Amino acid sequence: MFESMRHLSIGIGRQGRRHFLKLGIAAAFTPTLLNACAKSDTTASNTEASPSASAAARTIKFSHGSGLCNMPLFYSSEKKLFEKYGFSGTTALTPLNADIAAQLATGQVEMAVIPFTNAIAAYTQGASFRVVGGSGVQGLIVVAKPEIKSFADLKGKKVGTFQADTLDIIVYDYLKKNNMSYKDVEMVYFGDSTEMLNAYLAGQVDSISSIEPYATKAKTSTNGNILGDGKDIYGAGYPDCVIAARNELIEQEPEVVKNVIRTFFEAQYEIENNFEEAAKTTVGKYYKTDLASVLQAAKAQPPGVDIRDKRDFMYSRADSMLALNYINKKPDEQFVDFSLLEEVIKENPEMLERVKTKSKLA
């Protein structure tokens, strides 16, 4: 099924773009997937009920993307940082970017590191989760072939990205700023970062809107140009990936969610203070590129858990999603819930203090 979805995602033209997105998200709520989740939940319950099970065996399963904004999760998982709080964090197989929201929406995972626009798209269709914190900031980069030096040069060209992703919305926002629209370019949608990078390197598209470390690899491999990195239109420190948790987890086990936030703060501190170690820990297994590209991309997409001042920014991107017909209504006020993040910061102010300076300089 995943392979057929991958083929469908390639080369979706302007006419089929929005319809395809709606089909993809709607599929997440089909009875087949929901039944599969129910069976999975039953299995988990039986395991937890066994005499040999213990509190320390509690596992939180995350869906995730592939960019540097996911590094706090990957690093925490590899370094076993979650275990300090009596549970483990595991990463679910997420074949396509669109599956991140689907896995969270159907309960296949309890939490996710997800681009906030994908979260908006799923949430407005009835998904039961909330954004509880940040994971990574910045790093949305539009790279183009050497001969393409401005957005105006993109007219009539092919632009690759992920559908309804923050990477998709930033292209729309840049084109709008330059008095252009999606009618002026040919959007091509891919399933994952490696696939998109390879298509760009092979000359199948003229430009890509990508995340790190793949954007750096695209630029250096082709001597291409960076048309924009988001900071000129969004400001420094804008969010990309966020931490999302299912409502029942927030309501029934709020301390678990708070401990995930604490773990991400600890991961942010360690990543910021020894990025080379963090890169070596995650490259290959999580980042399908070379170590040099990851190290070079470090500053472009740093971790960032405290995004309380970016709440309005996330809601404002819903305007672009409405214009593209990705959603038919804005998310309500419950979509972003930083109450547990606030509690963690109040209870552990030192966690914020030791990352605050670097985060503000992002």
Image (cartoon, helix red, strand yellow):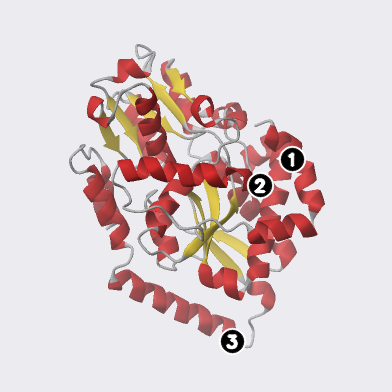
The amino acid at mark 3 is Ser
Q: Earlier in the sequence, mark 3 or mark 2?
A: 3
The amino acid at mark 1 is Lys
- Disc 3/disc 2 C-alpha distance (Å): 38 Å
- Above or below for 81 versus 186: below
Residue at 71% x, 68% y is 86
Residue 211 in the image, given as x and y percentages of width and height: 47, 35
Which quarter shows the C terminus?
Answer: top right
271 vs 194, left or right, is right
Residue at 58% x, 58% y is 337
Mark 1 and 2 residues: CB-CB less than 8 Å, in contact? Answer: yes
- Above or below for 148 versus 27: above
Residue 162, quarter of the rendered image: top left
Label 2: which residue?
306
Label 1: which residue?
356
Residue 311 in the image, given as x and y percentages of width and height: 56, 47
165 vs 47, left or right, is left
Number of other residues with Cα within 10 Å of mark 2, as a class: few under 14, some 14 to 19, many 20 or more: many
Q: What's the mark number on residue 50?
A: 3
**SS at circle 1:** helix
Which residue is more in the foreground, 100 or 153? Answer: 153
Residue at 60% x, 53% y is 133
Residue 164 in the image, given as x and y percentages of width and height: 36, 44
96 vs 75, left or right, is left
Which residue is more in the foreground, 49 or 307? Answer: 307
**SS at circle 2:** loop
101 vs 295, left or right, is left
